[in-house]
Image (cartoon, rainbow, N blue to C red):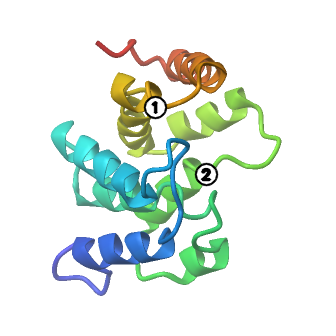
Amino acid sequence: MTGTPYLTLAEIEALAVAAHAGQTDKAGRPYAEHLRAVAEGVRARGGGERQIAAAWLHDSVEDAALSSAWLAEAALPREVKDMVLALTKRPGEELESYTGRILATPGALLVKEADLAHNADPARLALLDPPTRDRLTAKYARVRALLGLTPPN
């Protein structure tokens, strides 16, 4: 996104970290660690700058860290905004609808794959109580199946 009127990746990272400040994941870890892991997962999977930007912002609207109005006006490429919106699960939304939107949005599948990989990391899951771990493991497996992704190694 260099040479454009858009926010840089460094600015997007700082914005996402600030927006999620004070938020923790289900294991009590700072939420920014998850965002960083997803962004790195996208990079490691060959994703481009726009997918990495979407990785940093993928939970921002869903978690109300940033508003959809902010996203609409942000100095971001349309492609990044589309991926963030595709990755935003809506209240009461069926997984089939959610995953269908991800599959229909260019670039979003790779970001979701990195997100699922970090969410399903056995080291992260081990920090959770057994009922939560079992519920999330089943949920992540179902999402992977709906997206046509192979199970993690």
Question: Label 1 sits on what residue type?
Answer: Leu
Q: Which residue is mark 2?
A: 88
Q: Determine the residue located farthest toward the right in the rendered image.
A: 92
Q: Element under label 1?
A: loop
Identify the residue shown where x is 45% and y is 56%.
31
Which callout, 2 or 1, points to the residue nearer the camera?
1
Residue 74 pos. (x, y %): 48, 81
Tell me which corner region of the image, top left, top right, bottom left or bottom right, holds residue 9. Answer: bottom left
- The residue lying toward the viewer, choosing from 10 and 80, is 10
Where's residue 46, x and y in %? 18, 40
Q: Which residue is depicted at the point 53% across and 56% down?
A: 59
In percent of width and height, residue 8 lies at: 25, 77
The spot of residue 22 in percent (x, y) is 51, 69
- Picture mark count: 2
Q: Residue at x 29, y 56 (%)?
A: 52
Q: Quadrant of the C terminus?
A: top left
